[in-house]
Amino acid sequence: MDTKEFLFRLGTLEDLDQLVDLHYKSFTPDFHLAMVLGKRFIRRSYHWFLTSENAFVWLAEYNNQVVSMTTISDIPYNRPMLKHSFFAATLGLLGNPGILFHKEIRSRLYRLITGKREVMELQEDSHEIAYLAFIATDSSMRGTGLGSKILNSSEDICLKRNKTFIRAGVYRQNIASIKMFTKVGYKKVENIKNREIDYYQKYISKPQ
């Protein structure tokens, strides 16, 4: 399938239901821990990316269906996104309190809530970095190169927002994502250490 058949555009609130559906088709808690807090929390997370002046959703549409997307923030996003979604996160914990007894989940939720991981991400030039949070492509479109296209086409938006780097955190076991990022020019950031995640970054510039 030719990627010219897709419509690439910024997401709006009208896309919220489809974005959440695509998220649940594409991720499990192994690759996005916050899913244990429930769909209400995931929905509020996407709501933040769609409404915050510091973030945007870039998506591909085919036959009026969202088939690929990425969410990108101008700033480290965990704390502001959680603040926006706090009520939904609280309801998720109350509805499933047993998750707090799982040591690894408790540890990772603590880092999510406190933003500890993000402190490690900050560098002197962090105002030049766009932070990629989610990227997903519908399984029916895999093998078309759409994931790479959504990454590459999002760069123009980042440049317009005065960013010169895009950074993404990827779980080490997510080999498919690592291959996709490296294929389009992302390089591993060696000076950021994390127990579970490696960071990949790409320098972007305007075409000559």
Image (cartoon, rainbow, N blue to C red):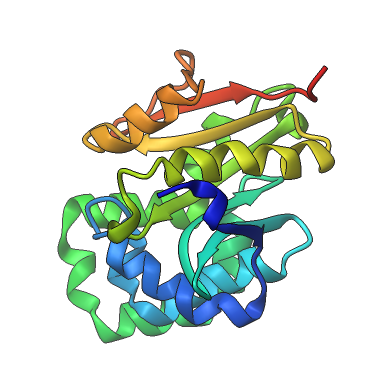
Q: In which quarter of the image is residue 8?
A: bottom right
| Residue 186 visible somewhere in the drawing | yes
Identify the residue at the far top of this view.
190
Residue under the image location 30 percent in, 30 percent down = 195
Viewer-proximal residue among 82 and 144 = 144
Q: How many labels does the image show?
A: 0
38 on left or right of 72: left
Residue under the image location 27 percent in, 36 percent down = 176
Residue under the image location 24 percent in, 56 percent down = 105
Residue 101 at x, y = what percent?
17, 64
Q: Quadrant of residue 137?
A: bottom left
| Residue 42 visible somewhere in the drawing | no
Residue under the image location 37 percent in, 36 percent down = 170
Pick the quarter of the image with the C terminus. top right
Residue 95 at x, y = what percent?
28, 86
Residue 192 at x, y = what percent?
47, 21
Residue 168 at x, y = what percent?
50, 36
From what the image shows, is residue 141 above or below residue 149? below
From what the image shows, is residue 92 above or below residue 126? below
